[in-house]
Image (cartoon, rainbow, N blue to C red):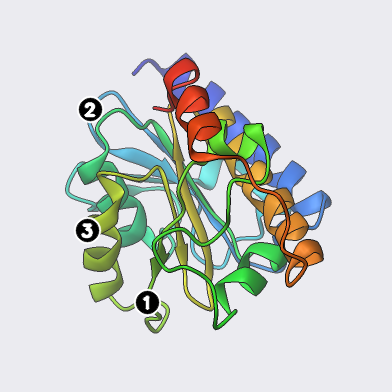
Amino acid sequence: MSRHDEHRIREQIATLGQSLFDRGLTMGSSGNISVRTDDGGWLMTPTNACLGRLDPATISRLDRQGEWLDGDKPTKEHFLHMAMYAERPQSQAIVHLHSTHSVAVSCLPDIDPCDCIPPLTAYYVMRVGKLPLVPYHVPGDPTLGDAVRGLAGQHSAVLLANHGPVVAGKSLEAAVYATEELEETAKLFLLLHGKNPRALTPEQVAELERRFPRD
């Protein structure tokens, strides 16, 4: 990766991180973003960093084994990204947030752990698809990476119980858009919860997945 490309990606991480923060999709120092580099490593937001105030120059750089190379110290949740990248070689970026409505869904006792949110809209199916629930782990627990790894090969997004979503995409923009779509659909789901909403049929879902394959 050239210096110019790396600089562009660092700027993009900061710009999109600020956008997510300014719109209330992440708060405080929660959430993290990463983008894969040509050598198999990735650039990642640092630990205790606010996504609304990222300095592109201090974004962490890790190698393909997840070892910290330079920049500020990476987030303690870097192993989540490592697990997703290991199972999804086609994915180039990952977004993990503690977004309010998605976290609220992850706390409900009656959701389907194999598919937490029904296919309420076409764009949710196109950008997220099925969303499995990962059982609760203490934040920073490395075994959470193993739990994510077990699902990442078949799913571009997972929902961590009482924690938040982890979403992979073919580009950083794609991962951000999918995360935003997930959060909006989680909001719809909560608004409709208990009202027996009309979801898309299996045939409609299959047609969308055929016509609009995700990464």
Counting the numbered discs, the total is 3
Classify mark 2: helix, strand or loop: loop
- State whether residue 103 is above or below residue 16: below
Give amino acid for label 3.
Answer: Gly
Numbered disc 1: secondary structure: loop
Q: Which residue is mark 3?
A: 150
Mark closer to the observer (3, 2)? 3
Indicate the quadrant containing the C terminus: top left, top right, bottom left or bottom right. Answer: top left
Q: Earlier in the sequence, mark 1 or mark 3?
A: 1
**Residue identified by numbered label 2:** 39
Position of 171 with respect to 22 (left or right) is: left
Q: Is residue 111 visible?
A: yes
Q: Amino acid at mark 2?
A: Asp
Residue 1 percent coordinates (x, y): 34, 18
Measured in 3D between alpha carbons, the distance from the residue under mark 3 to the one under mark 2, in whole angstroms, is: 24 Å
Q: Residue 99 lies in what quarter of the image?
A: bottom right
- Per the image, the residue denoted by label 1 is 135
The image's mark for residue 8 is none
Q: Amino acid at mark 1?
A: Pro
Marks 2 and 1, Cα distance to the nearest angstrom?
A: 32 Å
